[in-house]
Amino acid sequence: MSLLEQVEQALDTIRPYLLTDGGNVSVEEITPEKVVRLKLLGACGTCPMSIMTLKAGIEEAIKKAVPEITGIEAINLTEVDDPNAVLPENMR
């Protein structure tokens, strides 16, 4: 199974939760350094809680299922300094 297939399989475990809230995620690329670059779709792309979704949900699912992945980035993530961004306490 390719690295992309493994990542997609990991994302499939969290997609039902994203879809429930009107969102989704797509893999834009996996870099040679094994960093997954994602695009948050639908409600996830504009949600002020997208940082939490990425860190507590998407990132955890991928890293648990595909330990060789070195990082996860969202290309359209709500900025940390956005006044509407919701951050986990350990990120403040």
Image (cartoon, grey):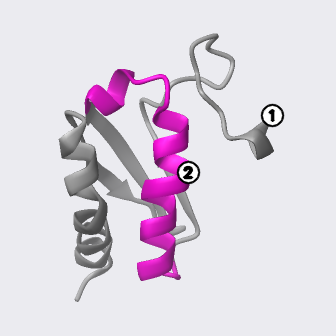
- Please name the predominant secondary structure of the magenta segment in the image: helix
Label 2 neighbour load within 10 Å: few <14, some 14-19, many 20+ = some
| Coordinates of residue 27 in the picture (x, y in percent) | 29, 53
Q: Check the image and name the residue furthest to the bottom.
A: 1
Q: Which residue is mark 1?
A: 92
Q: Is residue 66 visible?
A: no
Residue 59 horizontal side relative to residue 90, left or right: left
Asked if the stretch drawn in magenta spans residue 59, the answer is: yes
Q: Position of residue 2 (x, y in %)?
A: 26, 83
Q: Residue at x 57, y 13 (%)?
A: 84
Location of mark 2 (residue): 55
In the picture, the disc for residue 80 is none
**Which region is colored magenta?**
42-68
- Secondary structure of the residue carrying numbered label 1: loop
* Residue 83, above or below 13: above
Residue 33 visible to an observer of this rendering = yes
Q: Quadrant of residue 52?
A: top right
Identity, as a three-letter code, of the amino acid under mark 1: Arg
Q: Earlier in the sequence, mark 2 or mark 1?
A: 2
Q: Position of residue 36 (x, y in %)?
A: 43, 59
Cα separation, mark 2 vs mark 1, equals 14 Å
Which kind of residue does numbered mark 2 sit on?
Lys
**Mark 2 residue element:** helix
**In this picture, is 84 found above or below 42?**
above
- Magenta residue check for 51: yes
Residue at coordinates 41% horizontally, 80% vertically from top-left? 65
